[in-house]
Image: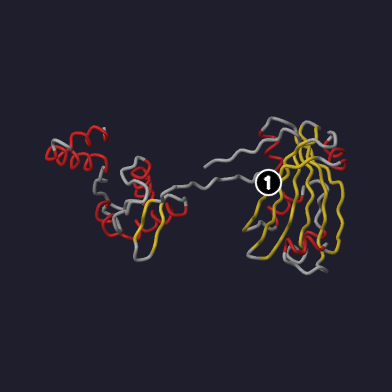
Amino acid sequence: MTPISVTLSLHHGAILNRYAHFEQERTCSPVPAQKRISFQVVRDEVKRRIETRIWPQGSLLPTETQLAEEFNCARATVNRALRELAEQGFVERKRKSGTRVKKAPSKQAKLEISLTRQTVENQNATYRYSLVERNVVASPGWLSSQLSVSPDSRVLHVICMHYADNRPFQLEERWINIDAVPDVEHADLQETGPHEWLLDAAPFTEAEIAFCAISADSRLAEYMGTTAGTSMIQLERTTWKDGQPMTFARMTHHPGFCIRTKY
């Protein structure tokens, strides 16, 4: 409809002006007055106007006061809605400059970190766990750098296997900072994996994940029941609790493993 209106404007400016005024009123769909309108309603309507190009990329949004009047809500409600849209990558907010639609709106992907047990059982397979090795050691240099701890820090080094229908599903190798989680030194990990134990006893507050494509060496190939050189996905995860480094883990998955995310 927009290309037609541009052509008509060359000959019928007055008609176009009336049409544009009607179109703006129709597409913006002001929300009827109501009590206690939620920030989700404001957020979703602003998002709709961005996605349908009512407010195109780079355009300046109405002020918080103007939006509050339109939606018949408190300015704080509008503020929260716009903050969420900024966090989701739809708008950018600058003090004294207002809120603008991002020129290249982006969305944040959501990656669910599930227990390996749950992942296996969700595939209608039988889960089995096996502890291979556990030792208290001095933090090696590379780990001290990774976790920002002193080289003489004591860490619990754990190697364990996860199976799906008795087939190798994941090899987990984990180093746990004992200073951050003292109880782990004597934790019973014979029946429960370290990830599962940590989520119950000392859940993390921050995590960093790296996805790596690797080729299996002879050690990995033996654990995973494949041949050296086979391509695999390995996840490296570092976790913190309230700013204190907790763990570093490498989780290597069976050939063909697939990771899905939503955004």
Q: Residue furthest front?
A: 10
- Give the quadrant of the N terminus: top left
Q: Position of residue 60 (x, y in %)?
A: 32, 54
Q: What residue is shown at x 86% (from left), y 60% (from top)?
A: 136
Q: Is residue 22 left or right of residue 174?
A: left
Q: What residue is shown at x 18% (from left), y 34% (from top)?
A: 8
Observer-nearest residue: 164 or 232?
A: 232
Is 182 placed above or below 21 here? below
Q: Dot 1, how many residues are within 10 Å of its Cα: few (below 14), some (14-19), or many (20+)? A: few
Is 34 placed above or below 216 here? below
Observer-nearest residue: 87 or 191?
A: 87
Q: What residue is shown at x 26% (from left), y 53% (from top)?
A: 72
Q: Position of residue 83 (x, y in %)?
A: 42, 57
Name the colouring of the figure: secondary structure
Q: Which residue is labeled 1 in the image?
A: 211
Q: Is residue 15 left or right of residue 98?
A: left
Is 153 placed above or below 111 here? below
Q: Position of residue 28 (x, y in %)?
A: 27, 43
Q: Is residue 104 left or right of residue 172?
A: left
Q: Quadrant of residue 27?
A: top left
Q: Position of residue 230 (x, y in %)?
A: 80, 35
Q: Say which amino acid is labelled 1.
A: Phe
Total number of numbered labels? 1
